[in-house]
Image (cartoon, rainbow, N blue to C red):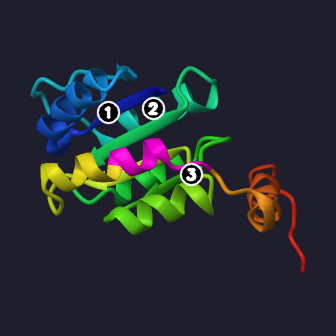
Amino acid sequence: MRIALSADHRGYAGTKQLADKLSAEGHSVLVLGDISGPPADYPDRAWMVGHAVAEGKADLGILLCGTGIGMSIAANKIAGVRAAVVHDELTAQLARSHNNANVICMSADLLGQRLIEKIAEIAVNTTFEGGRHEKRIAKIARLERGEVLSE
């Protein structure tokens, strides 16, 4: 799988370790932005990863910031991105299988490295179930286009 990764300064260490792990597992990992130390604003990093996913350069995006919330808000402003804050194995699995999330956002401050890696593993290995969830994803796409929804 092609995976785009980035983080603000709160998630640098976790992103480096996650990139190494995913690469060792045979994934094509694209680390976007300088994750070597200078402070970074999360909207810039969310934009980089979101555009890589929306443009088809990556199959999945993974973002780390202090809580994951800021990254999710920013990434969801990009058409074609369905970003979800995930905080455990279940939310990662459901975000991918039910919501077809193509970007997952995690907390670098609240999750340990082992859990970050486990969540990423689940996200990488979970596919969208389709079926009854298809119509909801279609409604999300309509919202992106500015259409009005009605029951």
Image coords of residue 132 (percent x, y): 79, 68
Disc marking residue 6? 1
**What residue is rendered at 74% in x and 56% in y?**
130
Q: Earlier in the sequence, mark 1 or mark 3?
A: 1
**Quick one: 114 or 53, which is closer to the camera?**
114
Q: Amino acid at mark 2?
A: Val
Q: Is residue 120 above or below residue 143?
A: above
**What residue is rendered at 50% in x and 36% in y?**
60
Q: Secondary structure at mark 2?
A: helix
Q: Amino acid at mark 3?
A: Ala
What residue would you read off at disc 3? Answer: 101
18 on left or right of 2: left
Could you classify mark 3 by the number of other residues whose Cα lies within 10 Å: few (under 14), some (14-19), or many (20 or more)?
Answer: many
Image coords of residue 119 (percent x, y): 33, 53
Disc marking residue 62? none
Task: Say whether marks 1 and 3 touch (CB < 8 Å).
Answer: no
Splitting the image into 4 quarters, where does residue 59 fall? top right
Cα separation between marks 1 and 3? 17 Å
Q: Secondary structure at mark 3?
A: loop
Q: Earlier in the sequence, mark 2 or mark 1?
A: 1
Q: Is residue 79 above or below residue 68?
A: above
125 on left or right of 137: left
> What residue span does the magenta drawing correspond to?
120-127
Residue 37: in sight, yes or no? yes
Image coords of residue 86 (percent x, y): 38, 61
Question: Of helix, strand and loop, which mostly describes the magenta segment?
Answer: helix
What residue would you read off at disc 2? Answer: 49
Q: Amino acid at mark 1?
A: Ser
Splitting the image into 4 quarters, where does residue 40 fall? top left
Q: Earlier in the sequence, mark 2 or mark 3?
A: 2
Q: Secondary structure at mark 1?
A: strand
Cα separation between marks 2 and 1? 7 Å
